[in-house]
Amino acid sequence: MHLSHQKEEQEPAPAKRSSARIWNILTVLILVTLVCVLSYFVILFLNPNSSLNPFPPGTLNPALLPPTVTVTPRHTLVPTWTPTSMPQAGVETPIPTLVAGPVLRQEVIPTEKPAVMVEPADEYAFELQQGSPSLITASQFHQTASCDWMGVAGQATSLNGEAVRGLFVELGGALTGAESVENLAMTGLAPQYGFGGFEITIANQLIPSEGTLWIQLLDQQNLPLSDRIYFNTYEDCQKNLVIIYFNQVR
């Protein structure tokens, strides 16, 4: 009796083992299914246009795309044909030879020097007024002046046309057959020529000269304010006073 009872208790064991196998199989199937589903979504994510996608994305309408810009040249340069000389066979090209001939020399005819010569220089504050210099008789400003005196006079004006006083006027150069001439005056000391007037005596006799005398404006530090203005003198009582006006330009 005891043995038969033990056999009855041991009979349910095969049923428990079969149920465990079923759960193991189901677990494996679920894992395989999850792996397949994940792989499917990864494929769709990486390639939305895959044939596995039941809802592929729509294609863009070409009409909605912006047109591409094509650069076309405005002018087409057509190569021009340039004729070239082809050497002929058997014909030698003569080499030109130099033949000595008379050399023509152009004769330069000297022209008369201008009455005024301005030295090329940098930009100065004062320039020569148009129409200067002019030659007049000294008796217009000095009624008692004799014919044995000659000089140079004028005036300096500012940008506004007002007289400028206190500038030095230097006379330099040389007269024909005489020693060098050096003299200094100041604007404003000869009011008969204007409030910025000056006057310098050249000589106490009439001596003709041609471009050997000059005057120049200087500031209080003896720095040039104008070019050297060269002028001529004449042995003529009607031209014994040279008038030169300076205008400020900057």
Image (cartoon, helix red, strand yellow):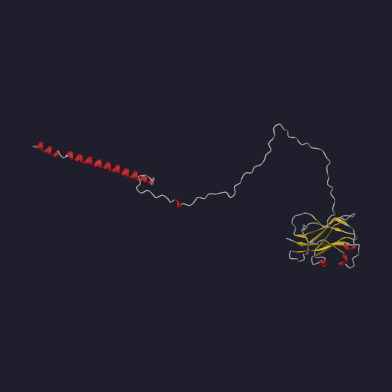
Q: How many marks?
A: 0
Q: Residue at the location (19% across, 40% down)?
A: 16
Would you place residue 84 above or below residue 140 in this image? Answer: above
Quadrant where the image shows the N terminus? top left
Q: Position of residue 92 (x, y in %)?
A: 73, 33
Q: Residue at the location (25% across, 40% down)?
A: 25
User: Quadrant location of residue 47?
Assistant: top left
User: Quadrant location of residue 211?
Assistant: bottom right
Quadrant where the image shows the C terminus? bottom right
Looking at the image, the residue that sits furthest to the top is 90
Q: Residue at the location (77% across, 62% down)?
A: 247
Q: Residue at the location (30% across, 42% down)?
A: 32
Q: Position of residue 177 (x, y in %)?
A: 90, 54
Q: Position of residue 188 (x, y in %)?
A: 80, 65
User: Which of the pair 66/72 is nearer the observer?
Assistant: 72
Looking at the image, the residue that sits furthest to the left is 1
Would you place residue 25 above or below residue 128 in this image? Answer: above
